[in-house]
Image (cartoon, rainbow, N blue to C red):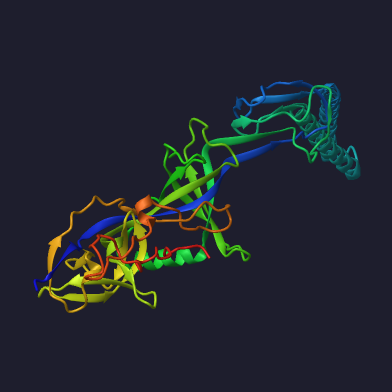
């Protein structure tokens, strides 16, 4: 009986970009609530709701007549104090000359000097009062604290506002750049560190690059980068927050939008990929593969797989470059059988980027695997019939490996 014919794929080492898709919410990079610092009646609203304002642009004008009157009174008090100090200075100078010739007592000279110093202090106090009232006049013109988009106004002309009131008059958001806060499980960070150490993974020196997916699934044209990592872990969810900075020149991203962030964790230079149809599960659930040895016989290997990349598995152990993995005819061979191997036609890798995650979860629930291209999660086809049991098929066994949990699945 001639050897059984099978199709094999010879494994090769290749670079693979590992990615991770996690949910997140957009947050304005700067937010300023506009509140009055003095009490008064709103006389004019000086901005267009929803428009862009520059830092320092006037927003509201309060009735400042009372503050201007107080400023005028403070200026008059300052002038009176300055006149008093001039008279006290002349008096102190005369007293000093008279004291030298004993024309007046030392006590009188000291009193004149003390009166000068008191007059000078009154001038300083009057100057401070003038500055305080000048500030009140300036605060009556409420200006934009930052540059950005201003929302709707909470008050209209004629409304009474009070100093440091809890309700803001309006809110200014700086939307360029935009922040995206994403949540990830602590286990993901630990797994990433282990993989980066053990797998020879190269990471970007200037931060992890991130691609944003909009709510409709479209790819946002401007890439971002991870800026900061929260220093604390939420004890209720076991997750921590990553902050991504994304350019937003067209203001396509608005505050509070639900998006998904695809982070490029790094590049594994020596990755080995094996087609999913070449991996099966034994009764214990362990991943196995049948390989053709140099002498043409079949051997079973225990395999460790980490994640799906397109229609392939990323191999962590059990297989290496050069191994010939059987992908067709699996049900017609047994360990030790002599086979005739032909190289299967290779399909282009569905992706060189790894990182699958399940359906979108609410931010804060931790990262979960999201779906990659359909081939990555396609269910295994029915096993080939045993010899004599029916026509031969090209399908993977029924116990084909279910997609193994991603190394950084959320918990």
Residue located 45% across and 54% down the image: 370
Above or below — where is 173 with respect to 237?
above
Q: 165 left or right of 338? A: right
Q: Quadrant of the N terminus?
A: bottom left
Please give the count of numbered marks on the rendered protein.
Answer: 0
Residue located 33% across and 60% down the image: 381
Residue 45: quarter of image: top right
Residue 13, image x and y in percent? 21, 61
Residue 279 seen by the camera: yes
Residue 129, image x and y in percent? 81, 33
Residue 354 seen by the camera: no
Residue 280: quarter of image: bottom left
213 or 246: which is nearer to us? 213
Residue located 85% across and 32% down the image: 88
Q: 197 left or right of 243? A: left
55 or 334: which is nearer to us? 334
Above or below — where is 292 with respect to 29?
below
Residue 166: quarter of image: top right
344 or 241: which is nearer to us? 344
63 or 8: which is nearer to us? 8
Residue located 63% across and 28% down the image: 56
Residue 126, image x and y in percent? 82, 32
Residue 259, image x and y in percent? 52, 44
């Amino acid at each position: 009986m001639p050897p059984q014919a099978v199709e094999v794929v010879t494994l090769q080492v290749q670079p693979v970009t590992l990615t991770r898709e996690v949910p997140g919410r957009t947050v304005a990079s700067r937010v300023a609530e506009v509140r009055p610092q003095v009490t008064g009646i709103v006389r004019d609203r000086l901005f267009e709701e929803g428009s862009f304002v520059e830092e320092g642009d006037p927003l509201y004008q309060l009735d400042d007549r009372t503050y201007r009157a107080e400023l005028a009174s403070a200026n008059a008090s300052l002038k009176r104090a300055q006149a008093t100090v001039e008279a006290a200075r002349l008096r102190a100078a005369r007293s000093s000359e008279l004291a030298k010739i004993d024309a007046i007592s030392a006590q009188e000279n000291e009193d004149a000097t003390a009166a000068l110093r008191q007059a000078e202090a009154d001038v300083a106090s009057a100057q401070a009062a003038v500055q305080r009232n000048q500030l009140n006049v300036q605060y009556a013109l409420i200006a934009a604290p930052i540059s950005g988009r201003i929302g709707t106004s909470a008050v209209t002309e004629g409304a009474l506002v009070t100093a440091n009131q809890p309700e803001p008059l309006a809110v200014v958001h700086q939307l360029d750049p935009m922040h995206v806060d994403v949540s990830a499980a602590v286990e993901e960070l630990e797994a990433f560190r282990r993989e980066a150490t053990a797998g020879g993974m190269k990471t970007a020196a200037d931060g992890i690059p991130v691609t944003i997916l909009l709510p409709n699934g479209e790819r946002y044209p401007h890439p971002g980068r991870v800026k900061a990592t929260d220093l604390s872990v939420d004890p209720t969810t076991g997750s921590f927050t990553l902050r991504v900075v994304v350019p937003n020149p067209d203001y396509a991203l608005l505050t509070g939008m639900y998006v998904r962030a695809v982070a490029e964790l790094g590049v594994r230079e020596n990755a080995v990929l094996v087609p999913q149809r070449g991996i099966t599960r034994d009764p214990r659930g362990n991943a196995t593969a049948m390989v053709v040895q140099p002498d043409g016989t079949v051997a079973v290997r225990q395999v460790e797989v980490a994640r799906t990349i397109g229609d392939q598995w990323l191999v962590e152990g059990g297989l290496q470059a050069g191994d010939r993995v059987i992908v067709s005819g699996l049900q017609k061979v047994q360990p030790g059988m002599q086979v005739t191997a032909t190289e299967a036609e290779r399909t282009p890798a569905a992706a060189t980027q790894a990182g699958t995650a399940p359906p979108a979860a609410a931010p804060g629930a931790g990262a979960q695997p999201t779906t990659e291209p359909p081939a990555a999660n396609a269910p295994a086809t029915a096993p080939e019939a045993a010899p004599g049991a029916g026509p031969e098929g090209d399908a993977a066994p029924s116990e084909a490996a279910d997609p193994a949990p991603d190394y950084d699945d959320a918990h």
